[in-house]
Each structure stands twice: as structure tokens, then as C-alpha cells.
Amino acid sequence: MTYVRFIISSLFYPLLAEIPVLLFIPPPLSLALVSLLLLGQTIPVVIPRVQAWQRRRAVEAELPFVGMLLFVLSHESFPNIVDAFSKIRELGSDVFPGMSREASILERNVTYGGTSEASAVESTFAAHPSEQFRSFLHGYLTALLTGKEIHGFAREEAGRFVAGLEERWQGFARLTSSMTEVAFTLLSIFPVGIQMVATTFLNPHSVNLLLLSHTLLVGATVGIIFLIDKVQPAIHDKEYSFASTALLVAVWSSCSLLMYIGYLTPIESLIPPLSVSLLLVVWSRRHFRLLHAGESEVGLLLHDLAEESRAGASLPIALSRVMAYSARFPSTRESLRTFSTLLDLGYDPVAAQKRITHGSWLVRVSMSILAVAFLTGGGYELLDRLSASFRRISDARHSLSVSILPFAVLGVFVPLISGAAVWLLSGIGSLGSFLPNLAAQSQGPGVALSISLTSLLSGLIVTKAYTLSLRNLVVMPPLIAATLVSLLIFGVR
């Protein structure tokens, strides 16, 4: 109730200042002042909604793996919700960052709430932003109260969550494809068209419309990247430093500015960004290669363990046999060796998996569930199901890259399309008819700046859509090279 009063006050009282400002202070100063007041009004509403969305997104991304974990835990036991959440918290926030926070909240309420465990669970998560999570807990409580087999319930829920995650990745691929297609159409045509219209029909020396169009394009690109990130299923891979992306953007922007004011030619302005992007891709290649390879190896590793277990070997012996041909797993080999060595030294499997530092979240989750399987003594049937589930998740993420690839290639062609548009309009202007300034203006720095900017923006969109991150710059060198080719072929100087 206190927070509701605070929201109402924050919305109402600023109106007492906004109305006089609009009445007695002329624009644009009044608009600037009112904008600041409006920002203050929206903060109490926006921040809780953003936090609720982040909480829901994190939990729903982890539910498929929580279902698998419960499936393993219930192999030879009958765990209640508090026991399951305690195990999640024990595995650590590196594996379950979202669910570990929920487990901490539940543990606090169970310890100090003074109610039964079932009542504590219901009161803790009654207002949780994720309906999917609330439904899972309700089904779990119902299974416990009715005596339903938890192992079967966990198997069904894990399969349902994995299928739901596959659907989310497929929906994300469709939506991202549509957004990138619209964005590339805008980036290919809009700035060049604005430049031609501004210099032909208004003032050839005016840059106001050009700067406005560039500002709008930057804002639209930021919005598209934000939307892609919002609809993307959450992943918790260890991220590469964002400094590499910031460095490339800074170098590219600085060189474009130097080109616009006349210190560099358009061709010269692209050489430093191309060199920097190549160096950054080489430096980061191993990090991202290990991430992608690890995702593909998880299902195969669990399958091999299942086959060894099917042949009658216990899990520790099966792991030792798999380690004998670990060359099949170049990305996860070190993680397997660490886990196996610590087990031989007498470490608890859960404590051993915490020493695994692989960058791929999928690898860390699989090793944590495998560690619990070591404790519960899971057999080949359990490992087979885990292998199939992880393969489905890995295949869903791989199919995303395949479906986005044509649009990533289209993004590389954005500077070529822009250059072709300049060349075409320049040819029309050279006819000397109704567009007299086009031929001259097509050789000016404004058009080259437009092509360079649209190339940078399309590169950021492709990077986010294709690699799910702004840190993997693998698409930048071919895009900068395409920009160079565009300027050379179509004669933009």
C-alpha cells in the first residue's frame, strides 16, 4: 500500500510544476524541463516492471534444466520443494543464477516465516511474475499432496519445458528475421534518399536533415537491438569483454568524422576499422569457438556415458572410460579432466563441478546435473533422456544460426545496396534534367558518411541477431570489406 501511495504521489505532484512550465515558459525550454519531470514520473513505474521482466526471463530460461535436475534427484528419492531448491542453491549461482535467488528467498521464508513448508512456498511465489513457474510449483505441490510419483512428474515437466524452450528459440528466429529484414531495408535506402532530397530540393550546403536522419537511424538501431535482446531467451554464457566492441565503434566513428571534415578520404577512413576488427576477431576466436563447440559436445558426452553405463559400468568407471578418448571433446576435455581428477581425490561431485569454469552455460549446467546423477546413482535410461534433452536444446540454438544466416548475408550487402543507390541517382542527375545537384552531391562526404554509418549500424544488428551478443565481431570484417568494395565500385569519393 505504501508503494502504491508513492507511485500516485510521483505521478500527481509533478503535474503541479509541469502545467505552469508549459503555460509560462516558451518552447523549447519548456519541453526540455517537462521531459525531465516526465522522466522522474515514469521511473517508479518502469523500474519495477523491468525488474519483474528480468526475474521472469531468468527463471523461465532455467526451468528446463530445473526439470532435468528434479528428474535426476527423484531417481531414488522423494524430494520435496524445499529439498529441491536447497540442491539448486548448493549447485551455485554460476549454474542457476535466477533460481538460486528464488531458493534464497524461499529458504529465508521457511526459516523465519513460522509456517509450514507448503504455506511458505505458496506465500513466497504467489505473486511471482512467471506464470509458468507458478504452474510448475502448483503441480509439484499437488503431486506431493496426492502421492503422485515425483520421478514421472519431473520427466513430464522436463520434456514440456524443453519443448517450450525449442518453441521460444523458433519464435525468436522468426521475429528476429522479420526485424532484421525491415532494418536492412531502412538502412540501405533511407539515409541516401534523405541526403539526395536535402541537397537537391533544399540547400546543397545544409546538413540539418542529414544529421537528423542519422540521429533517427542510430535511435532506430538501438531500439531494434533492444527488442532483439528482450525477446531472446536468456543465456548465461561467460561474456567476452564489451571493450572490444566499444573500441571498434570508437575507431569507426572517429575515422568517419575525420573523413567528413576532410582529413581522410572515404577509402582511408575504412582501413583502420578493418584492421582493428580483424585483430579483435582473431583475439576472441578461441573464446567463442569453445562456447559453440561445448554446446555441441554436451549431448554427445552424455550419450557416451549412457552407452558405457548400458554396458554395465558405474558412472565413475564410465567417466574414466570416456576420458580415455576425450579427444572427441576438444572444448569440454579440460572440464572433464578437472571433474574426474577431483573425484579421484575424494571431492564430493557437487563440490567438484563448482571447479568447472567452462564459458558455456550449457556445459556448466550439464556437468552440475551429471554431478547430481553421480550422487543418486542414475543409470543409462536417465543419461539417455538427459542426452536427448541437451541435444534438442543445442539443436534449437544451432537452427537459429542457420535461419538467421541469410539475413546476416543480406546485412553484408547493405553498403553495396547503398552505393548502388548513390550511383543510380548520380546517373539520373548527370542527365541534367530535374535533379541537377545529384551528380555533384554523390561525390561529397555526406553520402560517404551515410554509407559508412549504415554499414556500422547494420553490422551491430547482424552481430546481435546472428551471434546473440554484441561482443562476437565475426561479421564485422566482411561488412567493412563490403563497404570498401561499395565505395570503390560505385565511385563514391
Image (cartoon, grey):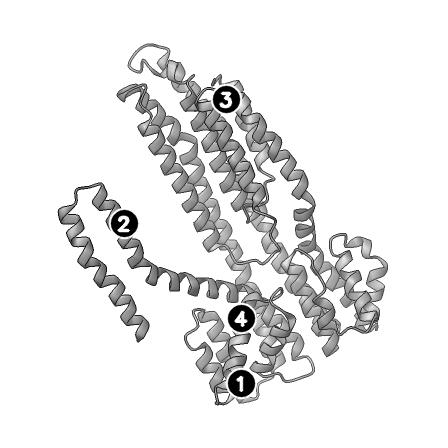
Task: Give left or right: position of 432 versus 266.
Answer: left
Contact flag, marks 1 and 3 (Cβ < 8 Å): no
Contact between labelled residues 2 and 3, with CB atoms less than 8 Å apart: no
**Residue 366 can be seen in this image:** yes
Q: Are marks 4 and 3 in contact (CB under 8 Å)?
A: no
- What is the crowding at mark 2: few (fewer than 14 residues within 10 Å), some, or many (at least 20)? few
> Mark 1 highlights which residue?
111
- What amino acid is found at the position of numbered circle 3 in the picture? Pro
Foreground label between 4 and 2: 2
Q: Amino acid at mark 2?
A: Ser
Residue at (31, 54) in percent of width and height: 39
Q: Nearer the viewer, residue 294 or 406?
A: 294
314 displayed left or right of 185: right
Q: How far apart, in angstroms, are the residues tagged by discs 1 and 4? A: 15 Å
Q: Looking at the image, is mark 1 or mark 3 nearer the viewer? A: 1
Q: Which element type, helix, strand or loop, lies under badge 4? A: helix
Structural distance between the alpha carbons of marks 4 and 3? 51 Å
- The answer to whether marks 4 and 2 mark residues whose Cβ atoms lie closer than 8 Å is no
Which residue does the numbered mark 3 point to in the structure image? 266
Residue 399 lies, in percent from the top left, at 59, 50
Quarter location, residue 126: bottom left
Mark carried by residue 35: 2
Quadrant housing residue 199: top left
Question: Residue 249: x and y, percent?
Answer: 52, 37
